[in-house]
Amino acid sequence: MYEPIRSKSAVHVVDGSRSEPQYPQSSRGEALDIQLAGHLAALLAVTDELGLEDGGAARIAEQVARLRGSQPVRVAHPAPPQGADTLTLHRRAHDLAARALLVAASRADTAVAILAAQRMDAHAAAANPVGAP
């Protein structure tokens, strides 16, 4: 019913012993840490670009430093954007915080999950002010 395998195995025999191909090895936890640090670093960049002074940026930077083992690179922006640019940045920050929340939940990192949820709330409120349609 099934055809026999006609190609050689991925496991090679060298000098009478089996050797498997060498690939970079990282655990699922390490991969999630890298992904989470990336989402948080992107969120930090957008938060810095918005020029927010609510303490969120400092807390995000702490978590990035904890995950990466070094302080994140931060760029000072001369002036926060105005109008539609601000709205776009708040929406982008909300999306990045949502991604961070998903990864934090999958790796069971409660501190980051709470921080990401708070940032989502803050950016949703800024993107949709009270009284706006």
Image (cartoon, rainbow, N blue to C red):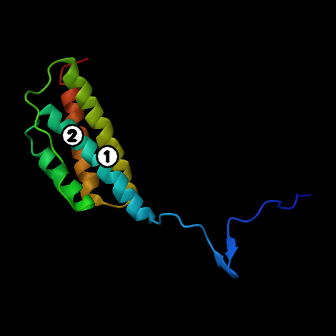
Provide residue 90's location: percent of width, then percent of height. 23, 30
Question: Which residue is drawn at the image coordinates 66% and 77% (left, top)?
Answer: 18
Q: Earlier in the sequence, mark 1 or mark 2?
A: 1
Question: Which residue is drawn at the image coordinates 47% and 66% (left, top)?
Answer: 25
Q: Secondary structure at mark 2?
A: helix
Q: Are marks 1 and 2 in contact (CB under 8 Å)?
A: no
Q: Which quadrant holds the N terminus?
A: bottom right
Q: Calculate the distance from the C-alpha at mark 1 to the C-alpha at mark 2.
A: 10 Å
Mark linked to residue 45: 2
Mark linked to residue 39: 1
Provide residue 46's location: percent of width, then percent of height. 22, 36
Taking the image as shown, residue 15 lies to the left or right of residue 87, namely right
Provide residue 12's location: percent of width, then percent of height. 68, 70
Provide residue 78's location: percent of width, then percent of height. 7, 29
Which three-letter amino acid code belongs to the residue tagged 1?
His
Identify the image quadrant of residue 87.
top left
Question: Which residue is drawn at the image coordinates 54% and 67% (left, top)?
Answer: 22
Q: Which quadrant holds the C terminus?
A: top left
> Is 105 located above or below residue 21 in the figure?
above
Taking the image as shown, residue 43 lies to the left or right of residue 30, namely left
> Is 21 located above or below residue 43 in the figure?
below
Q: Residues within 10 Å of mark 1 (few under 14, many from 20)?
A: many
Question: Which residue is drawn at the image coordinates 38% and 49% (left, top)?
Answer: 102
Q: Secondary structure at mark 1?
A: helix
Identify the image quadrant of residue 96.
top left
- Residue extending farthest front: 15
Of 133 and 26, the residue lying toward us: 26
Which three-letter amino acid code belongs to the residue tagged 2?
Ala
